Amino acid sequence: MSKPTGKDIILRPEQYLVEQGKSLDDRLQSVRLPVGTEEIIAAGRAKRVIRDRALGLFKIGEIVKEVLDWNENVDQEIRDAKKALLLSNYLERTDENTDAIADLKNLLLSAPGNTLFNKILQILDANPPDPLLVEHLATALEHIVETDFESLFEEHKYALAQIGQLTPQALAILADRKSWPLIELNTSTSTGSRVTSDWLFEFTSAYADSKKIIDPKYQARIRFSINELTTTRMMEAHLVENGLTKCTVTQMGQMLIPYISKPHNAD
């Protein structure tokens, strides 16, 4: 079987881990103690071995080393795949990559810029492989390199910290703000125009309907993501005309838009 590409690892991480699990099996087989060893192990050293009902008898030290070595290799390969896909996504956004490469070089050769780049990588490392997150972070990278990132260092750092606290699904919903539907609330309380009573269920249902999502599990994920946006004060609801309610991006949420929406979608 051919070696999986970085994109394969990101798009199908479960399949990648299943395949790598075969190599772990091989590692474990290589350190398994021979049949009959158990009978000659002294009672005082019994704690240094472990019996697995399916796999057999092992020295604890050896099996720990094999498991940790295997996990380190797999973890590094996944990390490398995520970073490679991030840079590929960034570079493929332009027909001519010359400026993109030069901009990236300028970022990496600057102390503040290098710090920002590594903060993006930290967000990647802290999350499971997710092409949606990679796309958002490539947008963030594109936005940062096109700005005076040294003078805007604190602003960029703060925005990346906020992005790191949100799930990829919440970021996607925030980036999709132009598609948020108007909703109708049977009852509500408000301060001025801002709705202070719960509107999560109504908006989740309307948004899922607009996306033709009928699976209850996906609807639950949407509800969780919207709750993220409200609790982090990225999103709120306001009363508008004809008894309708409009969900909007807050000032804090607007600050993140250039980092997660491509320029032509960031109006």
Image (cartoon, rainbow, N blue to C red):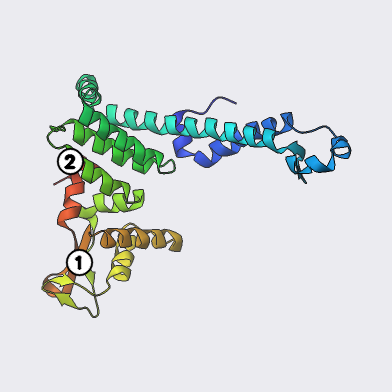
Residue 151 against residue 229 in the figure, above or below: above
Q: Secondary structure at mark 2?
A: helix
Res 46 quadrant in image? top right
Q: Mark on residue 154?
A: 2
Residue 265 against residue 6 in the figure, above or below: below
Residue 107: horizontal and vertical position, in percent? 22, 26
Q: Residue at x 22, y 45 (%)?
A: 159
Amino acid type for the residue under numbered disc 1: Ala
Q: Secondary structure at mark 1?
A: strand
Residue 193: horizontal and vertical position, in percent? 12, 71
Q: Earlier in the sequence, mark 2 or mark 1?
A: 2
Q: Is residue 261 visible?
A: no
> Residue farthest to the front?
44
Q: CA distance from mark 2 to mark 1?
A: 29 Å
Q: Is residue 45 visible?
A: yes
Q: Residues within 10 Å of mark 1 (few under 14, many from 20)?
A: many
Q: Mark on residue 192?
A: none
> Residue farthest to the bottom?
187
In this view, the residue in front, 155 or 127, is 155
Residue to which mark 1 is pinned: 237
